[in-house]
Amino acid sequence: MIVEVLCVGNELLSGITLNTNAHWIAGQVAKAGGTVSRVTVVRDELGAISDAVKEALLRRPDILVTTGGLGATYDDMTLEGVARALGRKVMLDDTAVEMLKNSYKRRHLHYRINKVRLKMATIPEGSEPIENPVGSAPSVVIEDAGVQVFCVPGVPVEMKAVFKKHILPLVKKGVGSFISKEVNYFVTGVSEGMIAPALVKIVDSNPRDAVYLKTHPRGYYRKTTPRIRVHLVCKGAEEKEVAGMLARISKQILKDISRLGGKVEK
């Protein structure tokens, strides 16, 4: 399952807001066995949103998730941008209007459904609204040539609620049976450059989609002794197979660390 994420918002590109949505979505997809192949961030501009959606659809991911730009203000234009990319119009949807009313009722908000708020229920032609269980603006799903396009709110708590209920199950279903096991080794006395050739041999001798092996520098002990973290993840369909792979590769990594004169921190 290949997932792309398109985050919309000037605040994400001005340093005002940290893009925690992309980080969280990537983690959820990875844990389910899918792959986030790309994260794109664009400003609240109709052309930028439309172009980014078009480019993503050309790459044919299984799922494209957009976050942000579903509200009632003038700069919330994600749905219009998606519609433009698909060559469709936006139209007021009766089901989305009812969802909007229900959201206010559920939270005891006595708002008048005026033209400004109806903007949140104006969605791309042919799309399906998804009720927002936490906030106001409905999410939207629309299919284009096999790509499921989900437009979800940018508010993290709202995004997470919709993602868990409507998107994550699709990822898990597409992946099927999936097991993931990981281990981290915190090593002193070995640098990334020293251990790199050994790790290349391990990666090359195993299926690429089954093994993730990465080193992370951790500075120096007393300014001279290198410290790194070796992160190993093994994935597969059968628990016994994955556990065996993890044990076998871990044994080899520990052997290489010892051979290079390094020590694993307890």
Image (cartoon, helix red, strand yellow):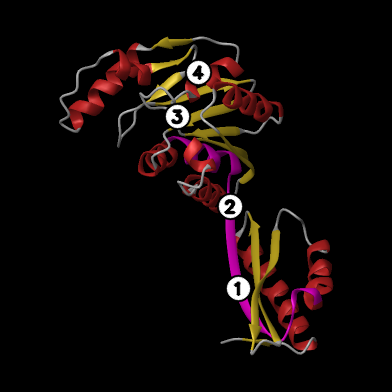
Marks 3 and 4 sit apart, C-alpha to C-alpha, by 10 Å
What is the x, y in percent for residue 183?
Answer: 60, 71
To which residue does mark 3 refer? 69
Per the rendered image, the range of residues in magenta is 166-193
Q: Residue at x 78, y 76 (%)?
A: 195
Question: Which type of secondary structure does the marked residue at label 2 adopt?
Answer: loop
Question: Which type of secondary structure does the marked residue at label 3 adopt?
Answer: loop
Marks 1 and 2 sit apart, C-alpha to C-alpha, by 20 Å
Instruction: Tell me the amino acid under the disc marked 3.
Output: Gly
User: Crowding near pointer 1: few (<14 within 10 Å), some, many (20+)?
Assistant: some
Marks 1 and 4 sit apart, C-alpha to C-alpha, by 45 Å
To which residue does mark 4 refer? 80
Q: Nearer the viewer, residue 52 or 101?
A: 52
To which residue does mark 2 refer? 178
User: Crowding near pointer 2: few (<14 within 10 Å), some, many (20+)?
Assistant: some
Residue 175 in magenta stretch: yes
- Circle on res. 184: 1
Marks 2 and 3 sit apart, C-alpha to C-alpha, by 33 Å
Instruction: Tell me the amino acid under the disc marked 1.
Output: Asn
Marks 3 and 1 sit apart, C-alpha to C-alpha, by 38 Å
Quarter-wise, where is residue 61 in the image? top right
